[in-house]
Image: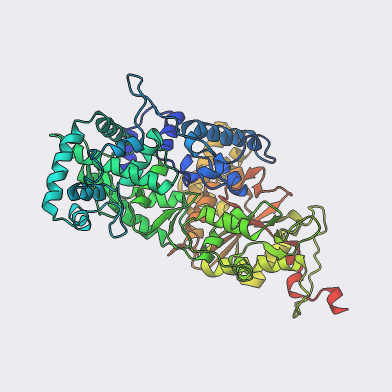
């Protein structure tokens, strides 16, 4: 049975265009809005991550001409990045470097009041020296005036005490002001805008999101982001107070004072808080759940009937906003606030791929760009050890010629496909200090990465030159005690069993294998292979020991790459296979490919080429020079 969320998703399906979706995202966008929230495809996210772009601020800071001439990037992906960047620059000029908000107009063509103008008109104008404690209490209550002793959305009694008066006169003042705000056209316009934003964003939003939406549309002359958001929050609270004074309010404020929620009813608030609780649980998973798996966990919570269709990015963002200690990465992963630096680096390995040399500041920027609220990275030389422990294929090098000091990529070139199948494996010996070459360091980093994976769990695709695969397979199985399983053999055995259960003669299967792709016989064969692949997947993910999977050719032939994604999602999970290694023969391509079909690895952190130096045991033997 489909989950209620999916049923609701289908029931509320509309003809919303991609442009409409971007506009809805832009309303709540901040400089820190992540690339994942902007709706980029996985390919585009990978390209942007290699460029060190993780947020909307960083995207809009780049000259769009650079995106037009990206090398080794498909035209479709380049165009996607350019178009999204251009559209966001149009929708949110205030987020572009040096940009300002283009204030909208009302139905009569008048300029909409700015946040500053709205906030300044919330309280009556008084002559100088005519200070009224009850109005100061309301200023503290709304947030127009702030004091460290009050929360961002204080209770009226707390605000009254901070102003030095009892709660009763403050409450009487608030009643009078509610009536005034209810008759003020500018506040009425804000309330109408808030009702519209709620309708666009699932009928439930955080108070902070509502303030950001107001800022996006009304703008502010204030330069300090904290002051801008505080004033917008004051206008939002006044709008909520006046809305609740109506006979039939369209929305209310619910939830805890430290994280108030605006919603059309209490059921939606309860739903958002359940999402927040689940987000806190998901954030504690290690390794982190993929965005797809995190979304599945959130979708398991049935939404109320009033919940309208929302994008996956919106559901993730709402869950994190309603949580107590979860955050959203630039790739859409839910992670814990204050995540340990080692885990942050290990999860960010894909962001460290691309440039030949990265400075310390660039490494820190790329990791913090992906996980802004993670723990701080240490300084060198502690950072060197941390990167090595995380499996980063980089090594520190001092300045050389025109190249500055930094972390240099240790990806050694693969052995050519035409080389001999014989590899000279050096004997293992103790390596003395000062004898580690760059190739040996790359081999050592590769082995450390494998050991970490096998200890902590996960998935990794390995590529090796075609003629070197048998030797690499032997080395992996021998050094780590891995059981080797041939995917092709497992699949063929499962297809035999499935064919027998369906009373299909094997000769018919073989004939279908020779049929033209797209023919009825070929489509039937793919259906048979898909059913058999389910059995194979069960065998692989239910194993209690790490596994090395070889001979994956039929993954491509029978269109079964989704099985790789399942291994990625389930390897290392409780009750599933601890670790999975997929060995892929390589023809020298930049990414793992099987018979021309790209293996769906999400980031470069999920695959690597086997260094020739590791196969040769270079990192555990003395070099001829060293022994001389």
Question: Taking 82 as reference, is 2 above or below it?
Answer: below
Quarter of the picture holding the C terminus: bottom right
Quarter of the picture holding the N terminus: top left
Q: Is residue 211 left or right of residue 238?
A: right
Q: Is residue 541 left or right of residue 479?
A: left
| Residue pictured at 60% horizontal, 32% vertical | 79
Q: Nearer the viewer, residue 166 or 328?
A: 166
Q: Nearer the viewer, residue 558 or 331?
A: 331
Question: Taking 89 as reference, is 276 above or below it?
Answer: below
Q: Position of residue 209 (x, y in %)?
A: 35, 43
Q: Position of residue 68 (x, y in %)?
A: 65, 34
Q: Is residue 541 left or right of residue 609?
A: left
| Residue pictured at 50% horizontal, 49% vertical | 331
Question: Is residue 66 shown to the viewer in this render?
Answer: yes
User: Which residue of the protein is positioned furthest toward the top in this rendering?
Assistant: 108
Q: Position of residue 328 (x, y in %)?
A: 44, 52
């Amino acid at each position: 049975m489909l989950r209620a969320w999916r049923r609701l998703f289908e029931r509320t399906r509309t003809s919303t265009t991609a442009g409409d979706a971007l506009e809805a995202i832009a309303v709540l966008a901040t400089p820190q809005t992540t690339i994942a929230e902007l709706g980029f495809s996985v390919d585009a996210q990978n390209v942007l991550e290699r460029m060190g772009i993780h947020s909307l601020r960083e995207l809009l800071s780049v000259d769009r001409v650079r995106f037009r001439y990206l090398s080794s990037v498909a035209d479709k992906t380049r165009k996607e990045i350019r178009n999204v960047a251009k559209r966001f620059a149009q929708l949110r000029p205030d987020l572009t470097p040096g940009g300002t908000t283009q204030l909208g107009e009302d139905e009569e063509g008048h300029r909409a009041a700015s946040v500053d103008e709205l906030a300044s008109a919330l309280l009556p104008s008084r002559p100088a020296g005519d200070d009224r404690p009850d109005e100061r209490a309301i200023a503290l209550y709304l947030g127009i005036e702030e004091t460290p002793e009050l929360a961002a959305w204080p209770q009226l009694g707390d605000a009254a005490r901070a102003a030095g008066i009892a709660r009763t006169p403050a409450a009487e003042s608030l009643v009078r002001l509610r009536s005034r705000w209810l008759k003020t056209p500018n506040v009425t316009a804000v309330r109408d805008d808030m009702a519209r934003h709620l309708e666009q964003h699932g009928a439930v939003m955080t108070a902070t999101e509502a303030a950001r939406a107001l800022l996006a549309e009304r703008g502010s002359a204030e330069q300090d982001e904290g002051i801008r958001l505080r004033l917008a929050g004051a206008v939002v609270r006044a709008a909520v107070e006046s809305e609740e004074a109506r006979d039939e309010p369209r929305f209310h404020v619910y939830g805890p004072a430290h994280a108030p929620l605006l919603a059309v009813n209490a059921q939606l608030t309860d739903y958002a808080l359940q999402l927040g609780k689940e987000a806190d649980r998901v954030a504690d998973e290690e390794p982190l759940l993929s965005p797809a798996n995190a979304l599945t966990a959130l979708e398991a919570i049935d939404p109320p009937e009033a919940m309208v269709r929302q994008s996956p990015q919106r559901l993730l963002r709402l869950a994190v906003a309603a949580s107590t200690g979860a955050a959203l990465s630039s790739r859409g992963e839910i992670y814990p606030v204050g995540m340990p630096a080692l885990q942050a680096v290990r999860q960010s390995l894909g962001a460290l791929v691309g440039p030949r040399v990265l400075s310390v500041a660039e490494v820190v920027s790329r990791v913090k760009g992906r996980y802004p609220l993670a723990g701080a990275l240490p300084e060198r030389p502690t950072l060197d050890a941390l990167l090595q422990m995380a499996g980063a294929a980089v090594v520190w090098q001092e300045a050389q010629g025109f190249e500055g000091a930094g972390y240099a990529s240790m990806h050694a070139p693969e052995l050519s496909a035409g080389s001999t199948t014989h590899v000279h494996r050096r004997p293992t010996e103790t390596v003395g200090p000062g004898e580690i070459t760059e190739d040996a360091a790359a081999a050592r980093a590769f082995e450390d990465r494998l050991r970490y994976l096998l200890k902590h769990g996960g998935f990794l695709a390995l590529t090796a030159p075609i003629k070197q695969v048998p030797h690499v397979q032997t080395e992996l199985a021998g050094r780590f005690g891995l059981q080797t399983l041939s995917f092709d053999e497992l699949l063929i055995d499962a297809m035999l069993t499935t064919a027998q259960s369906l009373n299909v003669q094997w000769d018919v299967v073989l004939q279908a294998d020779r049929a033209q792709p797209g023919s009825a016989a070929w489509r039937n064969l793919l259906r048979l292979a898909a059913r058999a692949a389910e059995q194979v997947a069960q065998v692989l993910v239910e194993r209690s020991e790490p596994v090395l999977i070889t001979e994956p050719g039929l993954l491509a032939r029978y269109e079964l790459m989704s099985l790789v994604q399942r291994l990625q999602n389930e390897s290392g999970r409780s009750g599933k296979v601890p670790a999975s290694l997929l060995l892929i023969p390589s023809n020298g391509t930049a990414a793992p490919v099987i018979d021309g079909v790209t293996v769906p690895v999400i980031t470069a952190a999920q695959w690597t080429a086997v260094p020739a130096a590791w196969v040769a045991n270079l990192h555990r033997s003395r070099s001829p020079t060293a022994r001389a």
